Image (tube, helix red, strand yellow):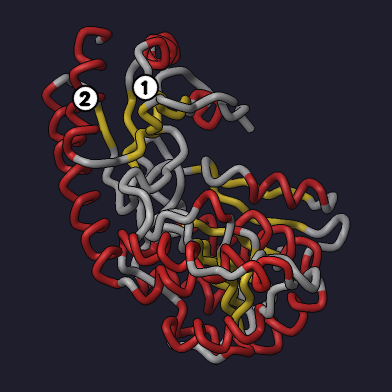
């Protein structure tokens, strides 16, 4: 997995798919209201889950709060991946799936998106018939940006009768496609969500896992008693209450994505359709040098050469319209 640049202060950060609009003012107000006593006490996460669960249309016993999706994946790996069992991936994808599977000494079965970033559905269904322990699936996928529709997801779930399918919906707010309603009747499904993207809480590290209560019970046994701090819990509650902020964020990101895609097209740069808050672009053979030159100009994008086996691919976080124009103005002369 590529190293993350250490000092990013003052840079235009288009490399980690963060929310460049920041977080809701209501979230900041909730943090300011935390009392000295609340900060001094261990958090009562179960009470918070009971208040959060209805916002997602689930019951409290179908939900866990976790320290971001990274912790969600670690819990799932610890609970469901035994040494030597197979784990199915479709790469390139979020590298932490492979990371946690390898930590459990799993056998990695990795399929690939093709050059058009098409999902290999037939090969996936065939691999699921071999009953791997877990199938990690990002939807929309990171870094390709592509989205599987609900019918395709149901077909995968119907085939994976002896496999836990982990559908990572980190970018759900931007895509609108979810399988969350399936958890109550399926013991082969876990859905992960994050507060890092649309609600802008990446710095507080909080996410959630949704699953059938039998699956959730297994995962809770693998979780530490106090995995989330009071600040993150308070911020998450406030973020869910401010739906207007999320709507504004999605609208602004949609506008920025259109500007970015159209601008890259005018510059002769190929992009791939994205249902998330980033765009995958092919900058050509000089891609890595262009990415380094952008960094020298104070702009960070994510070099994806390692994910695709050749230089050129870059993942670009979408921000405000002005931020996208600044990026395009810097990129043009470098091409």
Residue 99 in the image, given as x and y percentages of width and height: 71, 45
Instruction: Work out whether 238 lies above or below 139.
Output: below
Q: Is residue 210 above or below residue 71?
A: below
* Front residue of this view, candidates 96 and 42: 42
Residue 130 showing in the rendered view:
no
Quadrant in the rendering for residue 314: top left
Corner quadrant of residue 192: bottom right
Discs 1, 2 touching: Cβ within 8 Å: yes
Quadrant placement of the C terminus: top left
Apparent side of residue 35 relative to residue 235 in the rendered image (left or right): right
In the drawing, what numbered circle is on residue 326? 2
**233 or 72: nearer the eye?**
233
Which mark is drawn over residue 213?
A: none
313 and 67: which is toward the camera: 67
Residue 299: numbered disc: 1
| Secondary structure found at label 1 | strand
Which element type, helix, strand or loop, lies under badge 2? helix
């Amino acid at each position: 997995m590529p190293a993350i640049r250490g000092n990013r202060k003052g840079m235009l950060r288009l490399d980690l798919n963060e929310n460049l609009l920041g977080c809701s003012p209501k979230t900041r107000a909730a943090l300011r209201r935390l009392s000295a006593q609340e900060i001094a006490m261990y958090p009562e996460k179960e009470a918070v889950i009971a208040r959060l669960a209805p916002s997602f249309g689930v019951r409290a016993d179908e939900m866990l709060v976790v320290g971001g999706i990274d912790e969600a994946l670690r819990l799932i790996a610890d609970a469901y991946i035994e040494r030597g069992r197979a784990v199915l991936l479709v790469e390139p994808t979020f590298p932490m799936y492979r990371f946690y599977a390898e930590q459990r000494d799993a056998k990695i079965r990795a399929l690939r998106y093709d050059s058009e970033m098409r999902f290999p559905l037939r090969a996936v269904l065939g691999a699921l018939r071999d009953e791997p322990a877990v199938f990690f699936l990002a939807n929309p996928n990171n870094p390709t940006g592509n989205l599987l529709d609900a019918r395709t997801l149901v077909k995968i779930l119907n085939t994976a009768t002896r496999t836990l399918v982990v559908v990572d919906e980190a970018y759900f707010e931007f895509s609108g496609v979810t399988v969350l309603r399936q958890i109550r009747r399926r013991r082969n499904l876990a859905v992960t969500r994050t507060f890092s993207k649309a609600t802008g809480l990446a710095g507080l590290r909080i996410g959630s896992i949704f699953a059938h209560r039998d699956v959730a019970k297994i995962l809770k046994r693998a979780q530490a008693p106090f995995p989330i701090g009071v600040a993150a819990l308070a911020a998450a509650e406030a973020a869910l209450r401010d739906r207007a902020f999320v709507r504004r964020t999605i609208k602004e990101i949609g506008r920025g994505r259109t500007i970015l895609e159209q601008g890259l097209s005018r510059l002769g740069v190929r992009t791939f359709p994205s249902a998330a808050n980033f765009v995958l672009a092919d900058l050509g053979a000089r891609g890595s040098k262009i990415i380094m030159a952008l960094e020298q100009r104070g702009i960070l994008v994510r070099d994806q050469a390692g994910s695709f086996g050749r230089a050129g691919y870059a993942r670009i976080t979408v921000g405000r319209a002005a931020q996208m124009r600044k990026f395009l103005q810097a990129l043009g002369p470098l091409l």
